[in-house]
Image (cartoon, grey):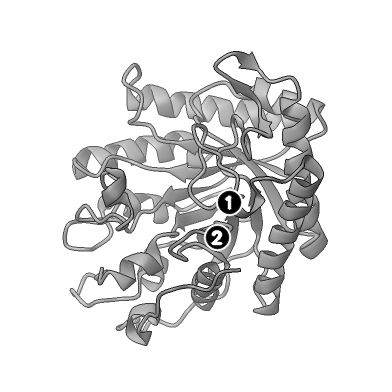
Amino acid sequence: MKKLIYILPLCALFACNTPEKPIEDEPQPGTFAKGGDLGWLTEQEADGVKFYNDNNEATDCIALLRSIGMNSVRLRVWVNHSTGWCNKEDVIIKARRAKAQKQRIMIDFHYSDFFCDPGRQDIPAAWKDYTLQQMQQAIAEHTTDVLSALQAEGITPEWIQVGNETTNGMLWRMGQLWDNNGDLPDGWKNYVVLSNAGYDAAKAVFPETIVIIHIDNAWEDRVWWYTAFRNAGGKFDMIGLSHYPQTNDQKSYTEMNTLCAEHVQQLAKRFGVPVMIAEVGTKSANPTLAAKVMQDFIDKVCGLNQCAGVFYWEPQVYNAWRPAEYIPLGWGAYDMGAFTVQGKPAEALKLLLGYQSVK
């Protein structure tokens, strides 16, 4: 695998001023997860981004988030991204840091060289000419390679995601479920073969780890999707959903959160597994409104017995930071970070990470 092309100074990599507060015992597996997806963290630090505590001291981001209640970290894995960020070596660096801060860990395999979502599931460049059988093998080898590297560090993920927002399958066109012309004849068959290759490889390294199949839009009825996946032979231990309650122009955030709660209960009952909100986010432009949205979400979703936890997606983004590669692509900055312009956790994030589960 291609080595990282960056070198981080130690103060940037491991923080400048970590809190003196002693690290508490590790959260117990199976308790409510209050997490953050921190995939961009090392890249931000390399760009000079700093994070501050209430005393205006530059502080390690993971330690800072732990101090306000975070107990879990989600890390995406790319196969071979050109910059090195989120490739295996970068993921190991972040996982070490998360472990040092007593965080539970979710590993999110994209099986791509870049972001995957319902509109983009690109085959890694090195795999582009593979047959279905070769693609199965590549998934198994990549999964095993990354997880074995974590195992060698003494890191056991509590959760492993096989694919990211795979609503329309993954590794297109081979594992795609439909296109503009309708359902693809071998879509579910191929997708399940590929997904199960990741599931089986994950279980071979970490038999007790929970494997999640993750799709988008918790506000939509997704029973049909998991029914089709299971009927085709798909394997999963937990359902993962994304939920961004301010991204639907036709529905209010209160409606979106109500629907999310209904669907968490519906899916858990139908399939007999817990549901993780693997991604959540609120609009950062209006922090007061963001806090209201988050409190409404917490009130409706977090207390459900069927909800295993919530991960805020890239909460540490602030002041319109964006990866350098976004500029030539014409992409703007992520607008749902949850830090203030002063580089401190915003109220919406404090509400989520400060939530006390009574389950």
Q: What x and y, as percent, mark residue 54? A: 22, 70
Of 54 and 249, the residue lying toward us: 249
Contact, mark 2 vs mark 1 (Cβ under 8 Å):
yes
Residue picked out by circle 1: 125
Residue picked out by circle 2: 80
Q: Earlier in the sequence, mark 2 or mark 1?
A: 2
Q: What x and y, as percent, mark residue 46? A: 32, 72
At label 1, which amino acid type do we have? Ala
Q: What x and y, as percent, mark residue 300? A: 45, 33
Of 45 and 242, the residue lying toward us: 45
Q: Is residue 170 left or right of residue 301?
A: right
Residue 305 shows which numbered tag?
A: none
Per the model, the C-alpha gap separating discs 2 and 1 is: 8 Å
Of 341 and 266, the residue lying toward us: 341
Q: Is residue 348 above or below residue 81?
A: above
At label 2, which amino acid type do we have? Asn
Q: Where is residue 343, by image quadrant?
A: bottom left
Q: Residues within 10 Å of mark 2 (few under 14, many from 20)?
A: many
